[in-house]
């Protein structure tokens, strides 16, 4: 009897060791996200928000994106078919893509979410990340969803740390290039409710501005300001970045802003506001472009979307064709 019990105990120990080394005791899946259980690694996902898509792309998993909303307009993700808007996407199109999972932010409508769930498609809503902590959390969560509890978490942390390291490298590459030794100052302006607004001090956009090795004049505090133009004019920043053409027109027609050194010296460049909420490859491109402008005088046309890039390509081709047809005919080639 003792021998029999010993055999059972030995077998149990061997099973425990096997589970430990094979991962059966601490498996990658299922993954629990809030009250959602993901049973296996998803192969085909639909991404509805651009921030999540940027993280997935940066982690090297763009190949898993079977579809995207129109809001996911990064040029490098344009090959994935669109499923409509991120608030009310086309459910039938998502079903046709044989999606395992839909990733979204809280703006997805309740009706769309319920419809997807009824069709047997899991939906995971991720917070809209604003701070570095929230962004790191999303990296870890997305990693776990795509690659499992252990591998995914490790890859998420590794990817986020790599992003921070690469951004630090961009900052270090321009250190000491201010010329007179004093740090340059910058600010970012956009329109909100048809009034000038800025990036708050607690936003990820402010973090990215910090990687220019310049001081954001709005970096302190997150309270709303009533007179943006007065603050900017008083600070007289070395460089101004702005969201779009309406913002630029507002800056130039403002009596105080039109007289600051950055505007008069044409040290003002467009950076689409969306670039500051995409914490992956887009963040790197944005910081690199701002640094090139500040320290090299190079203006980079940051493409806000694949559609914008396609539109500009089409416009350039049309203009080239128009110029070609308007060229005077060479002598001897004209018909009598």
Image (cartoon, grey):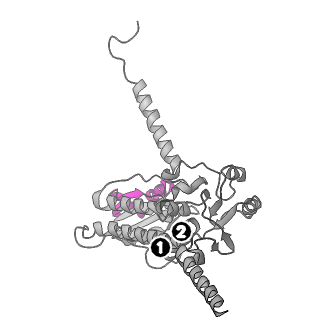
Percent x, y of residue 111: 75, 61
Residue, x 33% and y 58% (percent of image)? Answer: 293
Residue, x 61% and y 84% (percent of image)? Answer: 12
Magenta range: 244-270
Percent x, y of residue 277: 51, 65
Per the image, label 2 sits on a secondary structure element best described as helix
Of residues 41 and 182, the one nearer the viewer is 41
Quarter of the image for residue 2 reads bottom right
Per the image, label 1 sits on a secondary structure element best described as helix
Quarter of the image for residue 124 reads bottom right
Of the residues under marks 1 and 2, which one precedes in the sequence? 2
Residue at the far top in the pictured view: 336
Residue, x 60% and y 48% (percent of image)? Answer: 81
Q: Is residue 272 visible?
A: yes
Percent x, y of residue 173: 28, 66
Of residues 177 and 36, the one nearer the viewer is 36
Percent x, y of residue 128: 58, 69
Residue 143: which numbered mark, if any?
A: 2
């Amino acid at each position: 009897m003792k021998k029999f019990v010993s055999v059972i105990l030995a077998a149990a120990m061997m099973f425990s060791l096997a589970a430990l080394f094979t991962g059966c005791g601490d498996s990658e899946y299922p993954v629990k996200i809030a009250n959602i259980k993901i049973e296996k690694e998803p192969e085909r996902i639909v991404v509805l928000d651009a921030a999540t898509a940027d993280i997935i792309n940066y982690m090297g998993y763009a190949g898993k994106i079977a579809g995207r909303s129109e809001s996911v307009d990064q040029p490098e993700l344009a090959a994935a078919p669109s499923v409509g808007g991120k608030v009310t996407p086309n459910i039938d199109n998502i079903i046709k893509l044989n999606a395992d999972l839909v990733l979204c932010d809280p703006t997805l409508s309740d009706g769309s979410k319920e419809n997807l769930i009824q069709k047997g498609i899991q939906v995971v809503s991720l917070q809209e990340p604003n701070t570095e902590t929230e962004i790191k959390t999303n990296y870890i969560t997305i990693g776990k969803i795509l690659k499992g509890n252990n591998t995914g978490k490790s890859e998420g942390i590794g990817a986020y740390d790599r992003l921070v390291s690469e951004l630090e490298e961009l900052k270090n590459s321009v250190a000491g290039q201010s010329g007179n030794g004093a740090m340059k100052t910058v600010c970012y302006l956009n329109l909100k409710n048809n009034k000038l607004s800025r990036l708050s001090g607690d936003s990820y956009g402010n973090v990215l501005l910090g990687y220019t090795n310049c001081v954001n004049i709005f970096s302190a505090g997150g309270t709303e300001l009533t007179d943006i133009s007065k603050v900017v004019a008083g600070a007289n920043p070395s460089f101004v970045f702005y969201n779009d053409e309406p913002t630029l027109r507002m800056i130039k027609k403002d009596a105080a802003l039109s007289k600051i050194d950055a505007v008069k010296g044409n040290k003002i460049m467009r950076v689409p506001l969306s670039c500051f909420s995409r914490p992956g490859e887009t963040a790197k491109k944005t910081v690199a472009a701002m640094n090139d402008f500040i320290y090299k005088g190079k203006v980079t046309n940051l493409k806000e979307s694949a559609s914008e890039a396609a539109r500009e390509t089409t416009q350039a081709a049309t203009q080239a064709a128009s110029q070609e047809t308007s060229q005077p005919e060479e002598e001897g080639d004209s018909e009598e």
